[in-house]
Amino acid sequence: MLAENYSGSDGLTRRAALGLGAAAALLPRAALAQAALAQAGGGAVLIMNSGAASLSVIDMATRRETRRIPVLREPHHWALTPDRKELLIGDSSGNELQVLDPVTFAVLRRMPVSNPYHLAFSPNGKLFVVAGLARNQVDVYEAGTYKLLKRFPIRSMPSHMDFAADSSVVFLSLQGTGRIAAIDLRSLDVLWNEECGSAPAGVLVHGSRVLAGNMGSDDVAVLDAKTGKLLRRIRTGKGAHTLFWAPDRKTIWVNNRLDPVSVVVLDAATLDPVRRYRLPGGPDDLEFAPDGKIWFTMRFIHKVAVLDPGSGDYTTVDVGRSPHGIFLNPRAIASA
Amino acid sequence: MIPLFDTAAGWLQETLLLPLLFSLGLIQWEDISFGWALFAVYGAAQVVVTFTICVPLERWRPVERWPNAQAVVVDVIYTFVSRVGLLPLITFVLFFKLQVELNGTLTDIGWVPPTLERLFPFLFGKPVLTFLIYAVILDFGEYWRHRLSHAFRWWYSLHALHHAQRQMTFWSDDRNHLLDDIIGFAWFTAIALLIGVPPMQFPLLVLLLRLIESLSHANARVSYGWLGERLLVSPRFHRAHHGVTAAGEVSVNYGAVLPWWDMLFRTADFSREFVQTGDPTAEEALATGGYFTQQWVGARRMVRGIFGSKPRESG
């Protein structure tokens, strides 16, 4: 039996605004940044509004949207370059990457890329992988040059990915066919492609195992990373979706799209559920803030939720339609 | 208002659609269903707005009064099918899929797909302005589609269903043969793809244009004045297109939203007052039959149109 924790509070916590006032407008950007960082709980969160063709910048201190950055069509996920100097936003139906400064969120340039839905650099920083969900393709690029090394036409709906720690393999969920595929990044061959359940979304590598959230059922599938053999299922709730490591890697956080719409915490050692937070509104991607709070995008209510994992209370911040990806940077500057 | 609609769509998605998709084993289409939820909510709102505007207008200054308005009921069915039901779903799914494939392929071969924002960078981040520009371009396309639907006999055989209504009201805008709707959708989609309309804007553009088109079909003695009628299609202007003498392969006032194209291509007729509507050449079933009867008779009429025999005149 899970310990359930639910707070009915759904309104914006109205803190005193920490705006720097008119004088701040006269400060140079660097000074403004310093001033911003000096504030308790400073930094900014960038939200990918997939249904609004925009990015919302939220001031972490005031929990207010400070600006909105237009993108071409449909931003979903992001990747930080290995040198951490560029933040790539995948605009899937816009067929481009919008490259931002991860501190100021200034737009640096745009790169045409075919259907970038989910994207990530391999841990060793040498490869860049793009899952094209709508085009049934997985593209492997050379990081830095963004030269396409190989395209894997793959059925169907490649959705999310994660890498083996040594960067040898990338694991992808195939949402349309209920499978997980493993691609060898040294030989650029498909290692295995195995059934894992129904409509898998999030993928997480856990040592020698691969975890996948089965959105079409009520479980997280655990597969052997070498063979793809199904080892066990962990019931988390209907519509299990994305999975994330906590920063201390002691727990794994799983979002459930359906009954109950919630976030379930798994003990990373045993993979047993240890706590559930009810979070109606379509919890999706999440980020852990340095102050211990957890920020979630809420796809169906056009908000971001900020959860206090201790009390289970959460507050919300209004953003654009269908917020999906979330990038949290305690050093980022929220103001324009 | 927009946050309210979005919230309603979110509720629809989480409470009804996701459980339904889950039980059908189709939950991988959750993004698509959310898109449909948004358009269904906007479509329903548009029907309500149209109803709120047009019903008082039609009661205040009706062009015609009918002792029995039974023929209007089937137009109500057409409206709900077209605006809230299946059509928004099909348009969004097909348009989204087509655009992803087309643009992705173009990107692959090194050619960045065209969008207004790329051609005119100052439009980037100005969604309202680009939305309006897209609307004007699409309306131009609609003028020509409509004009051609009158020019070809087989096509007009389908389109006659739209013109057969003698009790024309704001509900009549969506009374179209399914095949005519499909052709119209393909036409509209091709133009939208060519100019790079964003997927989420596409059904909203359809809804905006349809709102004005509904008003132009109203059974209301409403004119926008000399200047207004040259800026926006009015009930008086469009009624001339539905007049019994304008039905068939040569007509006037083809414009859907903007009368500019009729003025430009010399098909505008601002002189006609509130004429009687209907198509004397159409079978009676097209005017007063039920939904499925109208679909069947329309299809049969089209086949005859293709093979050259003249459609049977109404009895």
Image: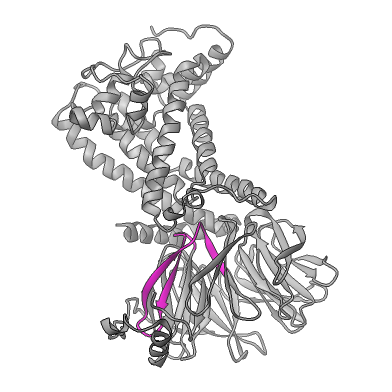
Asked whether residue A56 is drawn in magenta, I would say: yes
| Residue at 39%, 21% in the rendered image | B289
Residue B270 falls in image quadrant: top left
| Residue at 18%, 29% in the rendered image | B225
Q: Is residue A139 left or right of residue B308?
A: right
Colouring method of the image: one colour
Residue B29 falls in image quadrant: bottom right
- Label count reads 0
User: Where's residue B72, x and y in %?
Assistant: 31, 27
| Residue at 28%, 84% in the rendered image | A23
Residue B257 falls in image quadrant: top left
Quadrant containing the C terminus of chain A is bottom left
Residue B26 appears in the picture as rendered: yes
Asked whether residue A256 is drawn in magenta, I would say: no
Q: Is residue B143 left or right of residue A178?
A: left
Q: Residue furthest left?
A: B60
Nearest the viewer among A210 and A13 is A13
Nearest the viewer among A121 and B247 is A121
User: Where's residue B173, x and y in %?
Assistant: 35, 31
Query: Where is A318 relative to B204, above or below?
Result: below
User: Where's residue B236, x and y in %?
Assistant: 24, 25
Nearest the viewer among A38 and A250 is A38
User: Where's residue A51, x and y in %?
Assistant: 46, 59
Query: Where is B216 relative to B9, above or below?
Result: above
Q: Which residues are magenta?
A: A50-77
Query: Where is B47 relative to B290, above or below?
Result: below
Nearest the viewer among A4 and A163 is A163
Quadrant containing the N terminus of chain A is bottom right
Residue A197 appears in the picture as rendered: no
| Residue at 32%, 48% in the rendered image | B45
